[in-house]
Image (cartoon, rainbow, N blue to C red):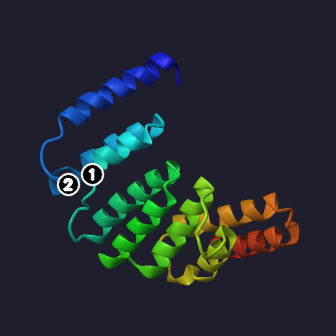
């Protein structure tokens, strides 16, 4: 994207943000669109501001959309401890334990962040082994992709091929 186009998008995003009226319950969809625009521009802190600190009520899909975007943005900013705290809050509000562990592992991997107790690879392996508990095929595929990529970077070719073959059996 050219600088002019980028600056034009930021101006549109600023105008859209200024038009937000109402709380998160009323404006979640608009906030997610605007936050995604700021994310595309690398404006992760601004995207977090747009989302706000309070999640929407009850509905699991709305909670997932809010928390998944917010945890991603915190990871992109390298704010691992805040990301972990947000995952704990999501769990307290009813987030599925297996899904949250898997998303956490993927976010650590995407942003090259560390967990204080477990390696990224260990968490990705566990998420892969828990795959039958996950509803989202897209999340399952991300787990395989991140695990295979990490194994290849570590020159653990045999294990990467084993995970790949397991993925082929699962998804084909």
Where in the figure is residue 23, as x and y percent of width and height?
A: 15, 52
Disc number placed over residue 21 in the picture, else none: none
Vertical placement of 15 versus 118: above or below?
above
Q: Secondary structure at mark 2?
A: helix
Can you tell which quarter of the image residue 106 is in? bottom right
Question: Residue 125: x percent and y percent?
Answer: 67, 76
Residue at 40% over, 38% down = 38
Q: Quadrant of residue 123?
A: bottom right
- Most extreme residue toward the top is 4
Q: Toward the viewer: 46 or 98?
A: 46
Q: Which residue is mark 2?
A: 24
Label annotation for residue 52:
1
Image height of 172 relative to 38, above or below:
below
What is the quadrant of residue 158 in the picture? bottom right
Q: What's the residue at 65%, 68% (across, down)?
A: 120
The structure residue drawn at horizontal position 39% and vertical position 65%, both measured from the top left corner, is 86
Where is residue 77? Give x, y as percent: 49, 48
Going from N to C along the chain, the mark reached first, 1 or 2, is 2
* C-alpha span from label 1 to label 2: 8 Å
Q: Residues within 10 Å of mark 2 (few under 14, many from 20)?
A: many
Is 5 placed above or below 170 here?
above
* Image spot of residue 37 (x, y percent): 39, 38
Task: Single out the residue that lies furthest toward the left.
Answer: 22
Which one is nearer the viewer's eye here, 84 or 60? 84
Q: Please say if the residues under marks 1 and 2 sit with CB atoms less than 8 Å apart.
A: yes
- Please tell me whether mark 1 or mark 2 is closer to you in this view: 1
Q: Is residue 145 visible?
A: yes
């Amino acid at each position: 994207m050219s600088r002019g186009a980028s600056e034009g998008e930021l101006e549109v995003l600023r105008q859209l943000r200024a038009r937000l009226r109402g709380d998160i319950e009323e404006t979640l969809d608009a906030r997610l669109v605007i936050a995604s625009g700021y994310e595309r521009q690398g404006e992760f802190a601004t995207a977090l501001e747009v989302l706000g600190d309070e999640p929407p009520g009850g509905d699991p899909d709305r909670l997932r959309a809010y928390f998944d975007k917010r945890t991603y943005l915190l990871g992109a900013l390298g704010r691992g401890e805040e990301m972990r705290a947000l995952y704990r809050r999501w769990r307290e509000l009813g987030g599925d334990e297996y899904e949250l562990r898997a998303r956490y592992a993927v976010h650590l991997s995407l942003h090259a962040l560390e967990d204080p107790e477990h390696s990224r690879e260990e968490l990705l392996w566990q998420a892969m082994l828990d795959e039958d508990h996950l509803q989202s095929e897209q999340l399952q595929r991300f787990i395989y992709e991140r695990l295979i990529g990490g194994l290849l970077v570590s020159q653990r070719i045999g294990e990467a091929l084993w995970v790949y073959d397991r993925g082929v059996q699962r998804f084909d």
